[in-house]
């Protein structure tokens, strides 16, 4: 298999060189963190002329380095390799194997001539609040499984065949090495149960494995649907005949988020400029794992496409919310009627903002009017975009709304900017 270029993440590491912080590569297990740091970033350092004696690269899960998992031993060993005043790059893989690793790294930061990069692969390290443990000295680079464009860079087939493969089996890099559909399905189901779910259960001391499995299945069945812990608790009772308190559901969801298995998109009142706490949407960070949770039975392409668009926006560095737009009209009796329209995604990055609808198909005039209604109700100058599944040529209507194919959106990192 050809080498996968993960340029967007590599560039984020490059942009953070020598910023005085510990660069922490986080993300769901098996998503390519070690590959990014130990191969791609290491090759970058070599190409810019950094010699091996100024790159301290330690794989802490290697049996040859087992004596370095003691914090004192690791600290002594690293300092013994720093023999001059030139800059040293420290690349530590699987740092969570070191007890009290935060104090080790904070101590190394006191050295004037080091630049530190770390990864980790268990749920202790993958907790989403890990950066706070560095007391403001950590800089997180989150990595996702392969995006569609990254997947297609090594896929031997048409865009349309690749799309079906991708939305079925997702973007976990090791899936690409599985040759048959059966092997891919078994790999993903095994990873979901034996790696991700078991890690969450062990870390959070969950007593009832059936409950967390049921929650994953419910969330997988309802990607892109507005919900909250109380609604999910009611679903447990009505559909599965399980009694789980909404507080417990809320805790379970936070565990799934901490392990980067699911992402929450909050509702945002576009006109009121405030977040609404009543309901949120949940998306899976990998569609293969999502489908594995449902034993590959339930694959509604429209909902999956929405999930893929969400992940692409996150990959590009956007903060992504679900937009709510209030409209006020009067009915035939003259009474004020308030309606709330949804914008699938409000994507923010710095001064850039985009309003995006995932429409899948707009086969009728009424459907097109429906998809545009919420966008037309947003009264600002930021770009408004509808993404459809059809392989169409990009166009702009008389209201300035851009309509583009999902393939054009996903395969071109600059697609929103034109």
Image (tube, rainbow, N blue to C red):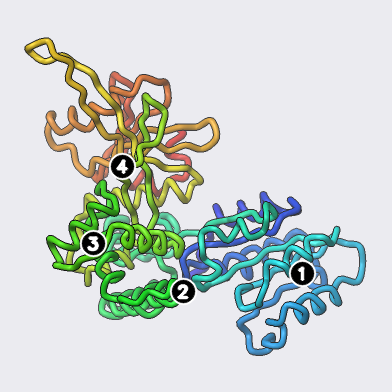
Between label 1 and label 3, give the one nearer the viewer.
Answer: 3
Residue of label 2: 203
Return the mark for residue 195: none
Residue of label 4: 278
Q: Residue at x 29, y 65 (%)?
A: 216
Give how far apart the Cα atoms at labels 3 and 2 are.
22 Å
Give the percent coordinates (x, y) of residue 146.
44, 61
Any part of residue 153 in sight: no
Q: Is 112 on the left-hand or right-hand side of 328?
A: right
Q: Is 273 on the left-hand or right-hand side of 48?
A: left
Sequence-first disc among 4 and 2: 2
Question: What is the crowding at mark 2: few (fewer than 14 residues within 10 Å), some, or many (at least 20)?
Answer: some
Sequence-first disc among 3 and 2: 2
Between label 1 and label 2, give the one nearer the viewer.
Answer: 2
Give the answer, above or below, for where 50 lies relative to 79: above
Give the answer, above or below, for where 261 lies relative to 345: below
Give how far apart the Cα atoms at labels 1 and 2 are.
33 Å
Give how far apart the Cα atoms at labels 1 and 4 are.
49 Å
Give the percent coordinates (x, y) of residue 51.
80, 68
Question: What is the crowding at mark 1: few (fewer than 14 residues within 10 Å), some, or many (at least 20)?
Answer: many
Residue of label 3: 218
Sequence-first disc among 1 and 4: 1
Between label 3 and label 4, give the one nearer the viewer.
Answer: 4
Question: Image quadrant of residue 149?
Answer: bottom left
Number of callouts: 4
Residue of label 1: 55
Any part of residue 225 in sight: yes
Instruction: Label 1, secondary structure: give it.
Output: strand
Give the answer, above or below, for where 206 lies relative to 67: above
Question: What is the crowding at mark 4: few (fewer than 14 residues within 10 Å), some, or many (at least 20)?
Answer: few
């Amino acid at each position: 298999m050809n080498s996968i270029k993960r340029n967007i993440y590599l560039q984020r590491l490059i942009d953070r060189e020598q910023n005085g912080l510990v660069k922490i590569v986080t993300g769901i297990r098996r998503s390519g963190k070690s590959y990014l740091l130990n191969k791609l970033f290491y090759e970058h350092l070599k190409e810019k002329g950094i010699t091996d004696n100024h790159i301290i690269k330690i794989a802490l899960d290697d049996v040859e380095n087992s004596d370095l998992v003691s914090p004192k031993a690791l600290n002594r060993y690293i300092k013994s390799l720093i023999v001059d005043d030139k800059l040293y790059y420290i690349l530590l893989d699987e740092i969570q194997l070191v007890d009290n690793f935060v104090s080790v790294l904070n101590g190394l930061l006191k050295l004037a001539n080091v630049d530190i990069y770390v990864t980790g692969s268990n749920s202790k390290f993958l907790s989403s609040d890990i950066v706070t443990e560095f007391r403001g000295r950590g800089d997180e680079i989150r990595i996702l499984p392969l995006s569609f464009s990254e997947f297609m860079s090594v896929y031997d087939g048409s865009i349309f065949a690749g799309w079906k493969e991708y939305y079925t089996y997702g973007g976990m890099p090791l899936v690409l090495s599985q040759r048959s559909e059966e092997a891919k399905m078994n790999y993903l189901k095994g990873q979901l149960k034996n790696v991700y779910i078991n890690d969450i259960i062990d870390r959070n001391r969950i007593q009832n494995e059936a409950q967390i499995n049921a929650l994953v299945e419910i969330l997988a069945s309802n990607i892109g649907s507005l919900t909250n812990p109380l609604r999910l608790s009611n679903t447990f009772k009505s559909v599965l005949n399980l009694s789980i308190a909404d507080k417990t559901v809320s805790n379970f969801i936070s565990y799934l988020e901490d392990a980067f298995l699911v992402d929450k998109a909050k509702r945002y009142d576009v006109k009121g400029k405030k977040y609404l706490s009543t309901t949120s949407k949940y998306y899976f960070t990998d569609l293969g794992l999502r489908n594995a949770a449902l034993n590959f039975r339930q694959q509604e392409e429209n909902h999956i496409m929405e999930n893929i668009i969400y992940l692409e926006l996150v990959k590009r560095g956007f903060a992504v919310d679900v937009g709510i737009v209030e409209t006020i009209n009067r009915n035939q009796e003259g009474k004020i009627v308030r309606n709330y329209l949804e914008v699938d995604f409000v994507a923010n990055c710095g001064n850039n903002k985009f309003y995006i609808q995932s429409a899948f198909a707009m086969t009728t005039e009424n459907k097109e009017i429906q998809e545009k209604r919420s966008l037309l109700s947003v009264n600002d100058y930021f770009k408004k975009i509808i993404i459809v599944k059809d392989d169409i040529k990009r166009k702009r209507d008389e209201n300035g709304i851009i309509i583009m194919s999902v393939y054009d959106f996903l395969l071109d990192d600059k697609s929103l900017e034109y």
